Image (tube, coloured by chain):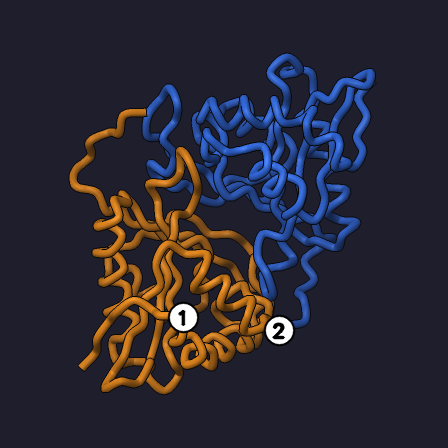
Chain colours: A orange, B blue
Amino acid sequence: MLTLRPMRPDDFERFWPIFHSVASARETYALDPDTTPEQARHYWLRLPLATQVAEVDGHLVGSYFLKPNGAGPGDHVCNCGYMVAESARGRGVARAMCEHSQSLARDYGFLAMQFNSVVACNDVAVALWQKLGFDIVGRVPRAFRHGRAGLVDCLVMYKWLGQGDVPLVP
Amino acid sequence: MLTLRPMRPDDFERFWPIFHSVASARETYALDPDTTPEQARHYWLRLPLATQVAEVDGHLVGSYFLKPNGAGPGDHVCNCGYMVAESARGRGVARAMCEHSQSLARDYGFLAMQFNSVVACNDVAVALWQKLGFDIVGRVPRAFRHGRAGLVDCLVMYKWLGQGDVPLVP
């Protein structure tokens, strides 16, 4: 049974091995593979507006953060990052976190969600985000030095979360 | 005669009116219009790898910053932001700064330059970046609440700075 709840400061050390493994692989995130636990805590837990953990039977299997993608005139668009433990992949954890994050984003009043840098050859992620309603709105050539594949493109993906097409007051 | 040189800490207060005017207008940057001088100094001068000022006869007419657009596997792509004093627009300041920034980026070893959020209706900027070799590689729908125009799209623009197509070693 998968449950989602806010990450507490003392959860971070259980999440750190997942973060470290993802950063070290250099396959999905533009993160320094030598990121320290303290830097990771800042990036994943302190900086964002919200950070959630996914647990199965008390085991932490994943986490995501939610933050505004820009300030001022761009602060109606949010950005999320998701990480899943390697041992828990293919079991719907990313899907559950992304659905949860969309609902949380709407609760915060965000009108859209943007992923700035989805590694184009990460087929599983790209297909999942598309299934969950995200469009590919950009493709940045050779923006990522993939740990195994070398220079690859990154995609910008986007989903409007608002109801209807009512333009905002400037 | 336009000159470019690194911004020194005591230049910042001369730049602040330009920054404040750009942020307040909500027409080009996803910046909080209420950004304080101290926050602006952090964003524009402390965080980036390099910040330059453009002067004409000793008057500060513009500034730009240069920083990596991502870490680790994305740190070969840089990002820049440019601001020009309203009184100095249409005189080639932005063009001079962008050309200077490309050269500086190459000196730092960057292989590409990416603008993440060019407001699509900013025709002057879009045309200038295209003239200087940048391609539109993405269009994010309704990502900016423009001070006068309401909800508008943002463009992702990109230029490869490297020589040839030699793939990097992962």
Number of callouts: 2
Please identify the quadrant where the C terminus of chain A is shown. Answer: top left
Please identify the quadrant where the N terminus of chain A is shown. Answer: bottom left
Give the alpha-carbon distance from disc 2 to disc 1, as whole Å. 21 Å
Which kind of residue does numbered mark 1 sit on? Pro
Q: Nearer the viewer, residue A49 or B88?
A: A49
Q: Residue at x 53, y 41 (%)?
A: B157
Left-right relation of B39 to A155: right
Residue B154 location (% of width, % of height): 43, 36
Quadrant of residue A95 within the rendered picture: bottom left
Residue B29 location (% of width, % of height): 49, 33
The answer to whether A82 is drawn above or below residue B125 in the figure is: below
The answer to whether A142 is drawn above or below residue B149 in the figure is: below
Callout 2: helix, strand or loop? loop
Left-right relation of B20 to B60: left
Q: Which mark is residue A34?
A: 2
For disc 1, the chain is: A
